[in-house]
């Protein structure tokens, strides 16, 4: 598998040089695709999607997932998952003690950008 960075794919926003996220394309079918997303340590990103299918599973690391302002953040263990249907922004923070690796299955493009606070 080849890891792609912001200079090699439009799925990662390259407007800020500090976005060191990488993507690996695992498979593509007619309506679905599978990706690995590597979020470096101490980086907070937004994954924006409009797809009717967006399923993610934590493979490695313990990223924090910002559910919404009312509920706050939840730490996700390996094997944890989250999903969405429609227009959603998933905010993830990979803590300083290591990178996070996610598997994503989706029917639409998505965009990874640095989170704005």
Image: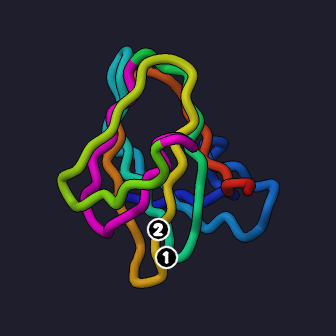
Q: Magenta part mainly helix, strand or loop?
A: strand
Residue 75 at x, y = what percent?
Answer: 34, 60
Q: Residue at x 74, y 54 (%)?
A: 116
Hey, which quadrant is residue 69 in on the image?
top right
Q: Residue at x 38, y 15 (%)?
A: 31
Q: Residue furthest bottom?
A: 97
The span shown in magenta is: 53-70
Residue 63 in the magenta stretch? The answer is: yes
Vertical side of 80 occupied by 40: above or below: below
The quadrant the N terminus occupies is bottom left
Q: Which mark is residue 56?
A: none
Q: Residue at x 69, y 58 (%)?
A: 7
Q: Which mark is residue 41?
A: 1
Q: Is residue 5 placed above or below 81 in the rendered structure?
A: below
Figure quadrant of the C terminus: bottom right
Marks 2 and 1 close (CB-CB < 8 Å) = yes
Q: Position of residue 45 (x, y in %)?
A: 59, 55
Label 2 vs 1, first from the N-terminus: 1
Q: Nearer the viewer, residue 8 or 23?
A: 23
Residue 87 lies, with reference to residue 110, above or below; the image says above
Badge 2: residue crowd in 10 Å (few <14, some 14–19, many ≥20):
many
Spot occupied by residue 25 in the image (x, y as percentages of width and height): 40, 45
Disc 2 element: strand
Task: Tell me which colouring the rendered structure shows.
Answer: rainbow
Residue ID for mark 2:
94
Q: Which type of secondary structure does the marked residue at label 1 adopt?
A: loop
- Quarter-of-image position of residue 16: bottom right
Name the side, left or right, on which 20 lies relative to 73. right
């Amino acid at each position: 598998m080849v890891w792609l960075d912001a200079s090699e794919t439009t799925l990662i926003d390259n407007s800020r040089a500090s976005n060191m996220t990488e993507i690996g394309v695992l498979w593509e079918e007619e309506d679905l695709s599978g990706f690995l997303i590597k979020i470096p340590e101490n980086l907070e990103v937004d994954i924006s999607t409009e797809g009717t299918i967006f399923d993610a599973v934590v493979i490695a690391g313990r990223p924090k997932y910002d559910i919404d302002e009312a509920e706050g953040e939840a730490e996700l263990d390996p094997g944890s998952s989250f999903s969405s249907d429609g227009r959603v922004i998933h905010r993830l923070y990979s803590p300083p003690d290591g990178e996070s690796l996610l598997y994503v299955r989706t029917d639409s493009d998505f965009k990874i950008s640095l989170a704005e606070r």
